[in-house]
Amino acid sequence: MKRDFTGIPIVDFSLSHSDPPKYYEQLRFALEDVGFVVFVNVPGFEDAFQKKLFARAEYLFSKPQAWKDALGTQHLYALRGYFRADDISGPHKAYAEAFRFGPDLPVPVGEDVPFWLKLHQGPNQWPDEEELPRFRELMETLFNRYHALNIALNAHICHILDIPEAVMGSYFPDATEFNSAIWHYLPLTPEIRAAAQDGFAQGMHEHRDPSTFVTCLIQSRPGLEVQNHAGEWVDVPMIEGGVVCNIGMQLMKLTGGKLVATTHRVNTLKIEEDRYTIPYVLSTKLDKKVAPLPQFANGYSAKDHAAPNPKILKLMGIDDPLERSGYARLSLFPAVGQRLYPQEFQRAHNLGLL
Ligand SMILES: [Fe+2]
């Protein structure tokens, strides 16, 4: 039975060294019952550094639309770069624009490169250094710090699960792979307010993270909401210098529901001014199937209040994890996906994934 919550736990990351019993008691509740935590005192995530990043983000999105479109996701099969989310139809529409990143790798070459690999591997589209000085350096510093946080957090998770770190490590590729983006949520307008229903205007539809172990995120303003076990929406607090981390469905699956992936959304009604967020996901091996570890195969079960999303359920039902990862990516970028991957897009449509 999961304990319910009315607030998101705020956990001092430095306690992992100074007072491990206290730290693990708090982290256990956060990951087993809530699925969300806001860490404070994470090395490298000081408020001044985060403010510098958000200032760069603000400058990036203040550039003319044509300048941003020249760095658009439609120019690369790996869908890196700029995109608007307010012109997407369907559940992935968000009153937002964003800029996607991953590890800088060459475009895979060859005649039979599978679509999922093309979607995952490629270079980033960095803005010109003169036009956005130190942007690349700042972002790469952030990615390195996020990586260090994820490595440390994975070890803490293994401690909670009482499993060797090598077990968790076997799900991650040797070379670091990740997904990141800068999101710019547009402020509330009278039109959006008028269209809101039940206290919600869609910034990001309600969902659980389907393909991940852990997602981490820094934010400049509030707007993120998490659904508790009673079905009520709880605000993720805005803590300066904080890092929000949440459990994804793959880690929930690995642990048989011991760690919980919780439904969340972004509510534009809470966004009075421009909001910037930078999520980061350390990717697991695309080709490694995730099944409950033997010690978690029975016993725990996923919490059942989460609204079933038939498209995500269908996606989770695709057996080949490589294909599933490709379709998951396509579903996030329907317009560009349809243009760059017409055959796979049609197949995904036929399978009811889009
Ligand atoms: Fe999410």
Image (tube, rainbow, N blue to C red):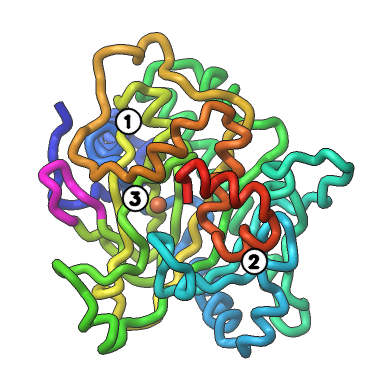
**Residue 104 image position (x, y, % from top left):** 75, 53
Compared across the picture, whether 101 is left or right of 122 comes to: left
The residue shown at (51%, 31%) is 318
What is the residue that sits farthest to the top in this orientation? 294
Q: Which residue is mark 3?
A: 207
Say which residue appears at 45% left-offset and 45% top-offset. 352
Number of other residues with Cα within 10 Å of mark 2, as a class: few under 14, some 14 to 19, many 20 or more:
some
Query: Against 50, is 158 above or below?
Result: above
Q: Is mark 3 within 8 Å of ligand 1?
A: yes
**Contact, mark 1 vs mark 2 (Cβ under 8 Å):** no
Whole-Å distance between the Cαs marked 1 and 2? 32 Å
Q: Is residue 227 magenta?
A: yes
Select label 3 or label 2 by which is in front. Answer: 3
Amino acid tagged 3: His
Q: Which residue is mark 1?
A: 259
Give x and y (percent) for residue 267: 28, 67
Q: Amino acid at mark 2?
A: Leu
Q: Residue furthest left?
A: 230
Q: Which mark is residue 146?
A: none
Q: Which residues are magenta?
A: 226-233
Q: Nearer the viewer, residue 348 or 241?
A: 348
